[in-house]
Image: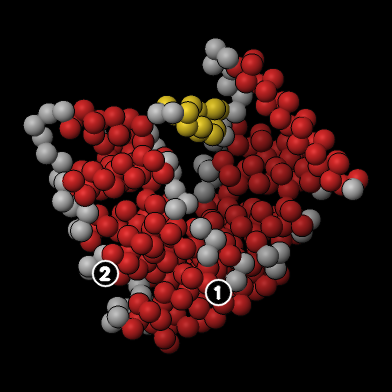
């Protein structure tokens, strides 16, 4: 049940089941604790994560490599990168997964250079980075804007670490280039990818998003074609395509994208946000008026938006 709620993205329910279990004679196993930690990492709530860490300590499983690695990941997802590193440093045993988790932790917290610095340290400990480690390092470069370093690492993967780049690695570098606005270089890289490797939808999506933002419709249309072929039931491609056409004033094409999605039965998930108040998580869904205080909430949001607009105008005028 805990794993099921966690898998469905319902951390509150997962924690609730664990608390109910604690009232019985059943003793949680390492697997149970791992599922609890994963649930807390999804909520990204630091207080709850510290509680889960305490549970692992009290159950005498915090020293387990898998559990300690999960704790490193959990704190990183809460933004507590210093705590994450402290737990990592205290681990008596570290495997490739542990090092990969710490590299990913630095990457997701905007510290790409610290992430890359772990690679030679890992190698000096006699551990060889694997495909997942490489992906974590490239992702750190992508989110940190380290284009030169990202390219250098991609080239060093084979001769220095013996890792053959796969579709996910190329997609990460393409995303890195697109984030930096280097759409043409990204397209050149796609052309250089070996024929045995299939360029994934995420790579084409990054290219399409960049083309949409920078008005490069020629490349964008090609990227859109690949996305709709690879993932015809994914709403993201249709939304990005519609946005691209709307940005250049091609309203008929934008409407066609919406019509095509409807014709194929593509489902669009409404965006939502979670706000934790005390021990309760409040979920706000776009376009949802079922909340009894919906009118009050909308008025407050509109006031905040107006205040932001006024502040931006003042900043611009100054």
Q: Name the residue under label 1.
A: 150
Q: Which residue lies furthest to the right in this view?
A: 317
User: Height in image: 142 above or below 55?
Assistant: below
Which numbered disc covers residue 306?
A: none
The image position of residue 227, as x and y in percent, is 58, 53
In the displayed orientation, state which residue is furthest to the left: 25
Q: What element carries label 2?
A: loop
Report if residue 178 is visible in the image: yes
Whichever of callouts 2 and 1 sits on the residue coming sooner in the sequence is 2
Tell me if 216 is positioned left or right of 147 in this view: right
- The answer to whether 299 is drawn above or below residue 316 in the figure is above
Identify the residue at horizontal 10%, vertical 34% (top origin): 26
Report if residue 195 is visible in the image: no
Extreme-bottom residue of the structure = 159
**Considering depth in this image, is 111 or 138 the residue closer to the camera?**
111
Q: x, y percentage for residue 259?
A: 66, 34
* Point 22% across, 48% down: residue: 56
Which residue shows up at 35% across the image and 57% down it? 72
Task: Give the distance between the C-alpha atoms of the residues marked 2 and 1, in whole angstroms.
Answer: 24 Å
Circle 2: is it few (<14), some (14-19), or many (20+) Cα within 10 Å?
some
Question: Mark 2 sits on what residue?
Answer: 95
Dot 1 alpha-carbon crowd within 10 angstroms: few under 14, some 14 to 19, many 20 or more: many
- Residue 106: percent from left, percent from top: 47, 63
Left or right, 135 with respect to 125, comes to right
Tell me the quadrant of the picture where the N terminus can be found: top left
Question: Which residue occupies 77% across, 57% down?
Answer: 214
Count of all numbered marks drawn on residues in the image: 2
Question: Who is closer to the viewer here, 239 or 289?
Answer: 289
316 sits left or right of 218 in the view: right
Q: In this view, does 270 lie above or below 31?
A: above
């Amino acid at each position: 049940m805990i794993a099921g709620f966690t898998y469905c993205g319902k951390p509150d329910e997962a924690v609730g089941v664990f608390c109910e279990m604690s009232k019985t004679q059943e003793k949680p196993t390492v697997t149970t604790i791992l599922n609890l930690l994963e649930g807390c990492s999804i909520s990204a709530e630091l207080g709850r994560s510290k509680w889960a860490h305490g549970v692992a300590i009290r159950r005498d499983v915090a020293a387990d490599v898998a559990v300690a690695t999960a704790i490193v990941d959990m704190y990183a997802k809460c933004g507590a990168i210093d705590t994450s590193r402290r737990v990592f440093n205290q681990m008596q045993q570290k495997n490739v997964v542990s090092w990969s988790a710490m590299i990913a932790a630095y990457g997701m917290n905007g510290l790409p250079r610290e992430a890359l610095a772990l690679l030679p340290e890992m190698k000096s400990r006699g551990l060889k980075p694997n495909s997942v480690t490489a992906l974590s390092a490239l992702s750190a470069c992508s989110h940190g804007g380290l284009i030169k370093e990202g390219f250098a690492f991609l080239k060093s993967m084979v001769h220095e670490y013996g890792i053959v780049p796969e579709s996910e690695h190329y997609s990460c570098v393409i995303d890195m280039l697109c984030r930096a606005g280097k759409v043409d270089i990204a397209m050149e890289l796609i052309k250089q990818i070996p024929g045995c490797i299939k360029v994934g939808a995420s790579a084409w999506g990054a290219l399409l998003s960049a083309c949409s933002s920078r008005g490069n419709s020629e490349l964008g249309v090609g990227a859109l074609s690949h996305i709709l072929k690879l993932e015809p039931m994914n709403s993201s491609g249709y939304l990005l395509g519609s946005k691209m056409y709307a940005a250049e004033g091609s309203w008929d094409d934008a409407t066609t994208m919406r019509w095509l999605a409807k014709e194929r039965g593509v489902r669009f998930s409404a965006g939502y946000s979670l706000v934790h108040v005390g021990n309760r998580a409040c979920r706000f869904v776009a376009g949802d008026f079922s909340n009894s205080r919906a009118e009050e909430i909308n008025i407050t949001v509109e006031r905040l938006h107006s205040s932001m607009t006024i502040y931006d105008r003042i900043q611009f005028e100054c």
